[in-house]
């Protein structure tokens, strides 16, 4: 059965390391460390890409943009997100619910620009994009300030012809 809508979920995590910039949802955020990764390590965008690909049964970010391919070294994850959307011209985003889990930095001042960056990349209305920040209440590597996690849920809707 070919459904007119599909739901996907995604997850990503990266360790904090010194001497890297912190990029979340395409926004550079001042912090003492950035995230370790082959690309710019924008974990929330990676989780969102996985959610979109999962909704459409297209695999995951590693299959599309492998971390052993030098083409994707230091890649801008927002450009990868746009690339994914170009691959699925028959689908549009219904809504996104994204949760970023980190002890620091505090993300509230950046929420509006992160939402706008995502809405622009996904070519959808800002009202369709939710970004939330949570802490891990000092539990585990995230709670110890060693890492950041991101969870994404997306509703994809088939475009009318």
Image: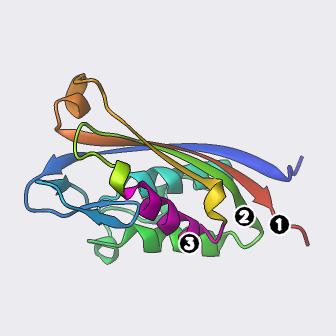
Whether label 2 touches label 1, CB < 8 Å? yes
Q: Give the range drawn in magenta.
A: 110-124
Work out which residue is located at the far left of the displayed protein and give it: 18
Q: Does residue 81 appear left or right of residue 122 in this picture?
A: left
Which tag, 1 or 3, sits closer to the chain's start? Answer: 3
Q: How crowded is mark 3: few (under 14 residues within 10 Å), some or many (20 or more)?
A: some
* Numbered disc in front, either 3 or 2: 3
Q: On the image, numbered disc 3 is attached to which residue?
A: 120
Residue under the image location 17 percent in, 48 percent down: 16
Q: How far apart are marks 2 and 1 (CA)?
A: 6 Å
- Magenta-colored stretch includes residue 153: no
Look at the picture and state if 105 lies above or below 90. above
Q: Which of 115 and 140 is in front in this view?
A: 115
Q: On the image, numbered disc 2 is attached to which residue?
A: 92
Q: On the image, numbered disc 1 is attached to which residue?
A: 159
Work out which residue is located at the far front of the displayed protein and give it: 109
Residue under the image location 74 percent in, 48 percent down: 6
Q: Can residue 146 be seen in this view?
A: yes
Q: Does residue 91 appear left or right of residue 118 in this picture?
A: right
Which tag, 3 or 2, sits closer to the chain's start? Answer: 2
**Dot 2: element:** strand
Look at the picture and state if 4 lies above or below 65. above
Residue 31 screen position, x and y as percent:
16, 55
Look at the picture and state if 23 lies above or below 76. above
**Dot 3: element:** helix
- Magenta-colored stretch includes residue 121: yes
């Amino acid at each position: 059965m070919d459904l007119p809508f599909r739901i996907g979920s995604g997850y990503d995590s990266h360790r904090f390391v010194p001497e890297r910039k912190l990029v979340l949802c395409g926004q550079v955020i001042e912090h003492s460390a950035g995230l370790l990764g082959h690309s710019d390590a924008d974990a929330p965008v990676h989780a969102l890409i996985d959610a979109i690909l999962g909704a459409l049964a297209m695999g995951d970010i590693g299959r599309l943009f492998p971390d052993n391919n030098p083409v994707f070294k230091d890649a801008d994850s927002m450009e990868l997100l746009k690339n994914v959307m170009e691959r699925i011209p028959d689908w549009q985003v219904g809504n996104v619910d994204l949760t970023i889990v980190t002890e620091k930095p505090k993300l509230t001042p950046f929420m509006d620009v992160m939402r706008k960056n995502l809405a622009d990349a996904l070519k959808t209305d800002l009202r369709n994009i939710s970004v939330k920040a949570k802490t891990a209440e000092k539990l585990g590597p995230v709670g110890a300030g060693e890492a950041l996690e991101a969870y994404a849920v997306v509703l994809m809707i088939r475009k009318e012809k």
